[in-house]
Image (cartoon, rainbow, N blue to C red):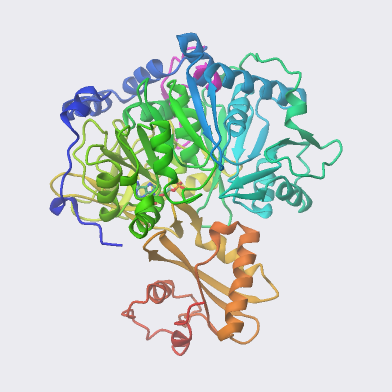
Amino acid sequence: MSATPTPADAVVYLPSEDFVKNAHVSGMAAYQALCQEAETDYQAYWGRLAKELITWKTPFTQVLDDSQAPFFKWFADGTLNASYNCLDRNIERGLGDKTALIFEADGGEVTKTSYRDLLAKTCQIANGLKSIGIGKGDRVIIYISMSIDGVAAMQACARIGAIHSVVFGGFSAQSVRDRVQDTGAKAIITADQQVRGGKHLPLKAIVDEALTLGGCESVQHVLVVKRTGAELPMTAGRDLWMSDVIANQPTVCEPEWVEAEHPLFLLYTSGSTGKPKGVQHSTGGYLLHAALTTKWTFDLKADDVFWCTADIGWVTGHSYITYGPLSLGGTEIVFEGVPTYPDAGRFWKMIQDHKVSIFYTAPTAIRSLIKAAEANAAVHPKSYDLSSLRLLGSVGEPINPAAWEWYYREVGGNRCPIVDTFWQTETGGHMITPLPGVTPMVPGSCTLPFPGIQAAIVDETGKDVPNGQGGILVVKKPWPSMIRTIWGDPDRFVKSYYPADFQGKYYLAGDGAIRDEKTGYFTITGRIDDVLNVSGHRMGTMEIESALVSCTELVAEAAVVGRPDDTTGEAICAFVVLKRSRPEGDEAKAIAKQLRDHVAKEIGPIAKPKDIRFGENLPKTRSGKIMRRLLRSLAKGEAITQDTSTLENPAILTQLDQTY
Ligand code: PRX
């Protein structure tokens, strides 16, 4: 991947005059006026937007309560319902017959669902959940692939005030178990199977396995959506077919009006330790930012067809499939499959078929589709009619300028602005991003903070660093959609995000960043903690190390680092010491495969190390500390420039050269 240039020496791309003229936020002066409004009276700014974008059952009287900082409360005495805001409200505005979801199955079948139908389905599921004893505050795990049922299940939980926790369909039984245990979920919503890339893959069978692993006593019911009709064992009393549960349920369900701070969902994400953290989001503040960023960053209008390719198992799918676009009455695509099936032209064909106007995807997908297009003209974007597109987005990892330019040129036809949106599971919505009718774009830079977001770059003591100097990315003021706490672990929340280094005042994003000297544009330089970003999926090195060493019959010790990868951004590289002698050749290959399968079983296939290297030991200092910087150099294949004089066992460096 080419190095990210600093914006000062980069080419600048401007949105067209026409785009600027028609955009929700039109021109730099409008952006600056919004920033100024937030600067002048922060609370009045967010209060105004919360009234404009959200329909409240009981209006709030206070915008921000910071009396227990960093446990901030937003709009605390207001009540609302997220599902009412996403569904009923649109029908009341005359959009009942408008298509809410265009579902395209893996095999290409298309199902369109109107707002009226989505509300009816949501209400039936909501009533079904109530009928099995689920109510306000109960946790429900949703382990399902991309589907109308998945979106409706999330909306149904929101409707009755149950807290959903969606687990990505690629996670293992062990990961499902961990999340069930941590949330204390009363029910799991899943499907018999999922269909991806022409293959039928298990879901319910993994739930069954998870529930045998222990610690899941809280689960009373498993609701199973029929996707493929596969034969399944159903545990009597526990397992129910969703179709039976909702069969006689009314299609209306009075929303549960919840306080703005009521948790809307928990979503597990990786941090610096071995245990994923349950990020807790609120209802009011979260929904506000999901709606507002969909409006301003994606410039969503009534006749747009919006497509966010993320899975509902990640935060991007929450904010920009389930909540943001629906809250604004948009029409969006829900895609079950993968970008390379039946061929790598799938995305372009779907844009053509559905006349998609706004397309939001991850750099890894773009990079892999570039490779495919270069190898085969038939799957090149120019073989499709992409003239419906007017705006492109990127998310999840840094986009290298070469990929940005290809996306701009070949997909966007040199006409569509690209919004490179920086944000995180914890932030709930976009934090630093171009606004498409405002910001001159520089490939590789996420440009400027969203209006009202006080992003800054500081040194280890919390002092601002001058532009042009890299540092630590922080957010100086709270914002409505911020993480509220880590479920069940408030201390970890404070330590992770409001550390004492900054007197507990700034939100620590966990990324490094640099601002351009002239423009002040932000460029993200990557995580500063032990978190890896592989294909836009976030993983902790410790989590993968724990998975490796849990293979107790084989592994004595393991250390995991990231290295740059042309397609996936970063790749996982594991250095492993076995309990037996160091293997070589075919034997090493076989053990490497065994270890990869083990990690897939513990966490999920996305966590499989790409490189595995075996040593009789790991490079350690005399005090026994693993020299991770050195491992990073080894993983990258770069010359060792670090001082190795403190290295206890220099001879093992040559052993660690061989990758399996
Ligand atoms: O390192 C940043 C990277 O992804 C991390 C957040 O990952 P996650 O919580 O899984 O959320 C991903 C989807 C929002 C960040 O700490 N990241 C995300 N977007 C960008 C990015 N890095 C560079 N540029 C981006 N646009």
Question: Which span is picked out in magenta?
Answer: 58-85
Which of 151 and 79 lies nearest the eye of the viewer? 151
When the figure is inspected, residue 84 is found, relative to residue 416, above or below; the finding is above
Q: Quadrant of residue 594?
A: bottom right
Which of 372 and 261 lies nearest the eye of the viewer? 372
Which of 566 and 215 lies nearest the eye of the viewer? 566
Question: Where residue 649 sits: x, y (%)?
Answer: 47, 88
Q: Does the stretch in magenta take in 120?
A: no
Is residue 78 in view from this perspective? yes
Residue that lies at the very extreme toward the bottom in this rendered image: 651
When the figure is inspected, residue 87 is found, relative to residue 187, above or below; the finding is above
Question: Where residue 225 sits: x, y (%)?
Answer: 70, 35
Tell me the residue at 18%/39% (across/down).
440
Residue that lies at the very extreme toward the right in this rendered image: 236
Is residue 73 in view from this perspective? no
When the figure is inspected, residue 36 is found, relative to residue 167, above or below; the finding is above
Question: In this image, 83 relative to 247: left or right?
Answer: left
Count of numbered badges drawn on the protein: 0
Q: Does the stretch in magenta take in 67?
A: yes
Which of 63 and 463 lies nearest the eye of the viewer? 63
Question: Where residue 553 sits: x, y (%)?
Answer: 70, 75
- Dominant SS type (magenta): loop
